[in-house]
Image (cartoon, coloured by chain):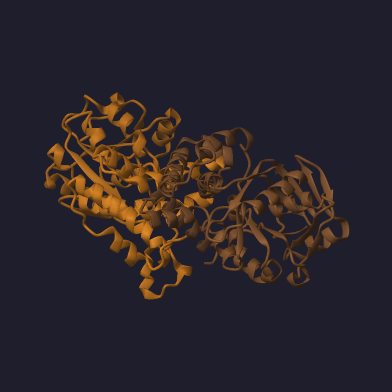
Amino acid sequence: MRIGVIGSGAVGSLFAAHLALLDDVETWIYDVYQAHVDAINADGLRLTGVGEVHSHPQATTNAGELPALDFAIVATKGMHTRAAMEDTAKAVSESAVCSVQNGIGNEEVIAEFVRTVIRGTTFPAGKLVGPGVVQWDTAGKTWIGPFEPRPATMGQVHALADILTRSGMETLALEDARGAQWTKLVFNAASNALCSLTQLPHGRAAINADVRWVMDEVIREGKDVAAALGIEMETDPAELLEESIGVALDHRPSMLQDVLARRPTEIDQLNGGIVRLGDEMGIATPLNRVAYALIKGLEASWKL
Amino acid sequence: MSFESVCVIGAGSIGSLCAGHLGRITAVSVLVRRPEHAADLNRDGLRVSGKSDFTADVLAATDPDLLPEPELIVIATKAMHVEHAAGAIAGRFPDAVVMTIQNGLGTEDVVARHGSWPIISSVTFMSGTKESDTHVHYELDTATWMGPYHQSGTRLETVQQVGEMFARGGLKVEVLPDLRPAQWSKLIFNASVNPVAALTDLPHVHLFARRQRDTDLGHLMFDLIEEGKRVAAAAGVELFEDPWEMNSRAVEQGSTHDDEYAHVPSMLADVRAGRSTEIDFILGSLVREAERLEVPAPLSEALYRLVKARDRSYDV
């Protein structure tokens, strides 16, 4: 069995490091970050934090070196999905390709390149602290299911879920994984965008009554859009937000990290995705639209 | 009628500028909160530098009973302290005229609850910096607009007399028969430009008026201004200028679109400097009016709350 991880930031590295522990899986990494790839090939990939893992996936910055893959896991940031698929199209054209990215819209891009797509949502998180080394901050489950327009079979979904679970990344195979995807989407739309605009860390934003008012509205709109799409939430995003106060009081969500470093954000896949689907379903999303416009404005301020 | 005794309540930068300039031409007393502030003013007088340069004698106290009977009272505290200031003069000085000079809206109503004085509304565009308790630096010598607060029966003639006195003292003044159209136009303009700038870190550039793509900031500005206009309409105010046109004109920059020279709104300057903002007096007053008049204003409310939270982030 050959599995490739496309995009080896924190989340991609968590998957690749675990998969490379399995004897019956040949694990590949494709990433454009040369120093990270070199370190992995020389010394292996290390995870530290909630678990200690040291394994030896094969890594490359040259997509032409990738063998034909049975499964591919796409873990780039949303704005890099298209470029990553263009680079790796040859190796993954016959693979079942699973997105574990944030927000919505990534599977749609992947489906332009391959016939078999798996929708995925993952909660484990960390950060790349240096080439070949990832700080693993939070454990959690992953949910995967067929992406309807170009679906993988449930047999393929179960096979991938079993491998991932065996490697140490607990994964659930679902007929309809949209509930998990929208749970995380709506949770992220509320937390990431509003932490970025107020520059407050996760839990501190959620306990601030003013920010919480806006977060609650963003969540309510997101749930309205999900309901119109016939999606049943895996968990109420408002509950996740409440839980996050304890475990992520001073954690800076990835978008706030991006904003502080003046990197492009995933707003198009988060609040932008809710606005887009809301428009399609005729559901008003005024406060997601406010957050979307303000983050776009913030990104524009870096170019003045 | 000439005003031979004026009392200024609150000696921040605007109060000090009023007291100092009026102190050159008439007897001025100042009501302040701290005894040492009063003592310093009584000993040293009030120095004004910058656009004007002089020192005026003032009589300062912390107790209104110690002040001579004023014919004009200028309440120059920050908006949230007007309640306390008006309470301090409740039941006193029945023949005086009271002038409010706060940012935002609604302080006239607060004063009216404490007495039946004729009230003058004003909005000032001048600015200054307090160098010390007895020294204010006069930076921008732009005008103060004033007009009668009609609910209190103020006559335009009274406002004209006050305006003439301000002008004789060396301040720029424009007297309007009804201040609200200008006050509200300026408020809605400020209440949209300032928070959006503060949250996006953008100076007031052409993006604020662009509405081509779906994500362009001009849509948000337009929607915010529409909310403000609905609140103004519910309050019975006919606007002096359309705030959307004020916004579009301001970003034209002589059609050069040169963002390098774009204005940095004061609220963005405050956020960049880590100072607390005037959000409560600007967008906050619009949100409170919307609530009072039961006009939905969810975008204004969201931006109001986000800027308030942004203020607090410096404490983390």
Q: Which chain is orange?
A: B
Chain coloured brown in the rendered structure: A
Question: How far from the left and from the top, in percent, is residue A94?
Answer: 67, 66
- Quadrant containing the C terminus of chain B is top right
Above-or-below relation of B128 to A91? above
Q: Is residue A168 left or right of residue A222?
A: right
- Residue drawn at x 41%, y 53% is A278
> What percent of the width, then of the height, locates residue A291?
46, 52
Relative depth, front residue between A250 and A73: A73
Please report the residue visible at 42 percent of the width from the left and 31 percent of the height from the top. Answer: B39
Q: Position of residue B45 (x, y in %)?
A: 39, 40
Residue B20 location, x and y as percent?
34, 45
Q: Nearer the viewer, residue A219 or B255?
A: A219
As rendered, which of A164 and B94 lies closer to the eye? A164
Question: Is residue B123 placed above or below B202 in the rendered structure?
Answer: above
Residue A262 visible in the current orientation: no
Residue found at the very far bottom of the displayed protein: B256
Q: Is residue B258 visible?
A: yes
Side (left or right) of B138 relative to B73: right
Q: Is B197 located above or below residue B149 in the figure?
A: below
Q: Which of the 4 image quadrants contains residue B189? A: bottom left
Query: Which image quadrant for residue A109?
Result: bottom right
